[in-house]
Image (cartoon, rainbow, N blue to C red):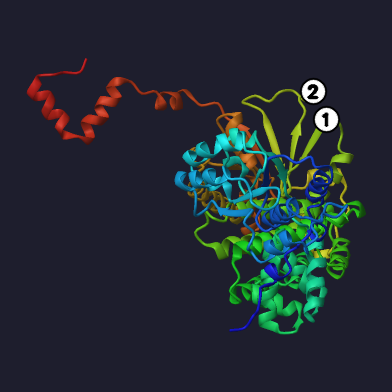
Amino acid sequence: MSNFTVSARKYRPGIFETVIGQDNVTQTLRNALKKDHLGHAFLFCGPRGVGKTTIARILAKALNCENLSPEGEPCNECPSCLAFAKQQSFNIYELDAASNNGVDEMRNLVEQVRFAPTQGKYKIYIIDEVHMLTTSAFNAFLKTLEEPPPYAIFILATTEKHKILPTILSRCQIFDFHRITVQQISDYLKIVASKEGIEVEDQAIFTIAQKADGAMRDALSIFDRIVSFSGNKLTYKDVIENLNILDYEYYFSLIDSCLEQKLSDVLLLFDEILQKGFDPHNFINGISEHLRNLFVCKDINTLRLMEVSEGIQQRYMEQSKKCTLSFLLSGLNLINQFDVNFKSSKNPRLHVELALMKLCHLNEVLSFSTTGSNLEKKKPDSVKTYNTSAVVIEAVSPAPVSKPTGGTKISMNLDKLREQALASNKTPEIIPDQASEQSVNYNKADKESFMKAWKLYGQNLKERGKLSLAAMAEKYEPIIEEDGIVHIFTDNESVKGQFIEDRLPFNDFLNTHHLSGIKVEFEIKAPSEQDIKKYLVNDRDIFNRMYEINPAVKELMERLGLRVD
């Protein structure tokens, strides 16, 4: 058997000064030791692997150190320190509450507290994972914790402070530990690698630090694992292969392809990722993180929020210059929606592919929206324009026009500006009057195409559970005029608003049938008297319906001699 010791134990700090990332805790404890202002109970709270138990041991060692330094550090040379290092100290007791959480174990501990130390000044009790104690064990421990003998000091450690009884919390000095930063973990791993004679790449160390998620112990464990895999030279390629992490290059290539609207490249890239066994949900999260980093790069003051190596940071800065803020914000919102809905999707691959399709054409939609906002600046005050990403909805103010009979109107212009922009590869210059007056002369084939699209749209509404809109689509057949204006009727403002909110799927059906140049007007149509009577139901109507569908009703009436008045 070899004498190999894992790095997390081999490089465990022995004094406060060597603890990484918890300066607020170590400085307070050193000052308390120097001034001899020590409480009788400490509670260390924080995530796993950030140094709670390590600092508890250093504090326990320092409390009985015979040659405490002026800085409040244990000497590691006196008999007490040496006995602790060899795990032979009779004054320091460690209890794992995860496996010793019953009332009997706690009563045994309380019984030990009664006896004063034979050597040294204090008896120190370190209870790890203290939140695992049962309520009975806490109660058995409470009296001793409240009024311990002067030589007893308790150091409790937990990852879940909220599970500890308030009566326990109120009797302890509480220290909150925080996650160690990626940079701090990275710097420490370089020191360890240097001591071990291992050559490392900066990006490889940074990736391990990111994977550790703020826990130094996890980082050292991952480091040992990668070294066992790669030997004395630790490369970025070895790290991502061993940890099954997607390379940054995939995300940079993805965004480049999206900016150039190369959908085929995007889908093939995703297929390659799936072929390598990566989880599509993690890929979605990775896109969000990448877009967030690009957004952070837009302002030099927020660069410090990025936890990546300098080389990768420079690549982010270069790519962020190609992206508009609108693209990044809209992309983050889009990917977040797909992330939220991922678990409910029955086809995860198609779900992610749809997200990639929308992201790939996001700039095109934003460009079209910008065109609509340019029109807004040139329109008269009587017309207000609402940007809706895919279409421009114009609401005519009632001041300059008389109120139309039969209800209000909202017109939705669906012109051919997008097709012109794609054809010329630039945003066309548009004169507002011409844009608003564009219309299409419809022939019979056009009308048939629209009705086919409208029917498919109605079916789609049912499939998506929008039954009120689907019922309205069946109730009123659109009227198509010769000048290309299509009138779609609704019963009230609420349903009309729902149609407008559902404009994106509606536009997709129109574009599929090459009908993007039409003008659609939504109008409210008051129900006729015949319609009202149709929906008024009395008791006789209900009975007649029951009579029709259930012959037993007729038999019951005959037996009991009943009649309907």
Q: Residue at x 71, y 48 (%)?
A: 121
Residue at image coords 13%, 19%? 562
Distance of label 1 from label 2 (alpha carbons): 7 Å
In which quadrant of the rendered view does residue 232 lie?
bottom right
Tell me: residue 209, above or below residue 142: below
Outermost residue toward the right?
A: 300
User: Measured from the top left, where is residue 29 in percent x and y?
Assistant: 78, 47
In the rendered structure, the answer to whether residue 67 lies left or right of residue 349 reads right
Instruction: Pick whichever of labels 1 and 2 is earlier in the sequence.
Output: 1
Q: Is residue 221 above or below residue 71?
A: below
Tag of residue 382: 1
User: Foreground: 217 or 32?
Assistant: 32
**Nearer the observer, 451 or 492:** 492
| Residue toward you, 531 or 305 | 305
**Which residue appears farthest toward the top when viewing the image?**
565
Q: Report x, y in % for residue 490.
A: 57, 34
Pointer 2 residue: 399
The disc label shown at residue 117, or none = none
Secondary structure beneath label 2: loop
Residue 452 lies, in percent from the top left, at 54, 53
The amino acid type of the residue labelled 2 equals Ala
Q: Residue at x 87, y 34 (%)?
A: 380
Whether label 1 touches label 2, CB < 8 Å: yes
- Look at the numbered disc 1 and give the secondary structure of its residue: loop
Asked if residue 362 shows in the view, the reply is yes
User: On the picture, is 514 further left or further right than 545?
Assistant: right
Which quadrant, please, contains the N terminus?
Answer: bottom right
Q: Residues within 10 Å of mark 1 (few under 14, many from 20)?
A: few
Please provide percent x and percent y for residue 291: 76, 58
Quadrant of the image containing the C terminus: top left
Q: Identity of the amino acid at label 1?
A: Ser
